[in-house]
Image: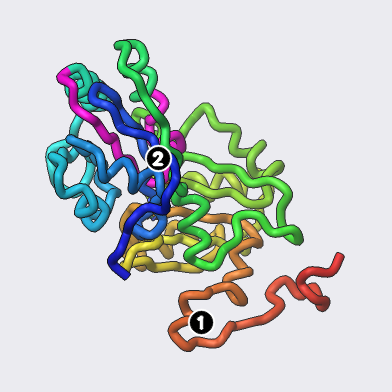
Amino acid sequence: MTDTTLPATDWPTLQPGWVWLCGAGPGDPGLLTLHALNALRQADVVIYDALVQEAILDWAPQADHIYAGKRGGKPSAKQRDISLRLVDLAQAGKRVLRLKGGDPFVFGRGGEEAQTLVQHGVPIRIIPGISAGIGGLAYAGIPVTHRDVNQSVTFVTGHDQSGNTPSSLDWAGIARGSQVIVIYMGMKHAAQISAQLIAAGRSVTEPVAVVTTATTDNQAVMETTLGALDADIKAANLEPPAIICIGQAVRMRDVLDWQAQAAGIPPVNLDPLARGRPAESA
Ligand code: SAH
């Protein structure tokens, strides 16, 4: 299907001098929102991050594409420089689309960019996107909440701005209070994070999934346990970007790995939590 005409409705116009801060989703271009597509159609300039797929940029052939990522061997751009670049482009009268991986307001520093724009009098629109910690897990067959497992979920970043494990985080509190923990940017400090969770009472046998390049053609899922997490990441040579999901929800993959099923592999277990009753019953 190549016809990507937007359905008829009153789409907003990206005006000269405006910046739209937009989520591109976790990878699969089909996970863009229609507002994102509408923005791609109108932009003069697209400033994009490392995690935004090329195929998505192809949908804005009329625009200049400027790379502002911090990965992939290309020179890294400083956050402040990116924000000021956006201000400059907007003040030069461009229609600016700032495209960020996932959701712009989830561990993406979108709030800071937006704040700088507003402080400089640049009008903005925010277009949310599907965050990797939700959509990436869904593509791995893991429901981020599941009634039999969790009534809450905690999204955590494994890095702080200095690159350390966030020392301000109360890992013991998270260990006690959140049955499912979803970690962004957690690969580097996986050993430290799992040790702190285990010290706070989480089981070494608790299931963990590491989903790399989720929703792209290279998506891979490694299942392990909290005790073996770091050793298994190293043994499998896993590289970021990855989402780490800790908790019993991971076991639902046995029945919900829909990509494996589509490839002809039958479900491993139709009742992985051993409830012994139909899924919908109370
Ligand atoms: N704003 C983004 C997160 C940016 S932080 C969002 O909402 O998804 C970057 C981190 O997000 C990565 O280090 C990784 O932990 C996670 N991430 C983003 N895209 C991913 C993908 N396709 N697969 C796995 N993890 C991803």
Answer with left or right where residue 148 lies relative to residue 190.
right
> Please, is residue 44 above or below residue 90 in the view?
below
**Which of the 4 image quarters holds residue 204?**
bottom right
> Mark 1: which amino acid?
Gln
By secondary structure, the bulk of the magenta-drawn segment is best described as loop
For mark 1, what is the residue? 261
Q: Are marks 1 and 2 in contact (CB under 8 Å)?
A: no
Q: How many residues crowd mark 1 within 10 Å: few (<14), some (14–19), many (20+)?
A: few
Q: How many residues crowd mark 2 within 10 Å: few (<14), some (14–19), many (20+)?
A: few
Q: Earlier in the sequence, mark 1 or mark 2?
A: 2
Give the residue at x 65% y 55%: 145
What is the number of the mark on residue 11?
2
Q: Magenta includes 108?
A: yes
Answer with left or right where residue 87 lies relative to residue 23.
left
In space, the residues marked 1 and 2 are separated at their CA atoms by: 37 Å
> Mark 2: which amino acid?
Trp
What is the number of the mark on residue 104?
none
Do we see residue 81 in this rendering?
no
Judge by depth and name the residue closer to the eye, 256 or 231.
256
Do we see residue 48 in this rendering?
yes
Q: Magenta includes 145?
A: no
Give the residue at x 39% y 29%: 125
What stretch of residues is rendered in magenta? 92-112
> Please, is residue 174 above or below residue 219 in the view?
above
**Which of the 4 image quarters holds residue 247?**
bottom right
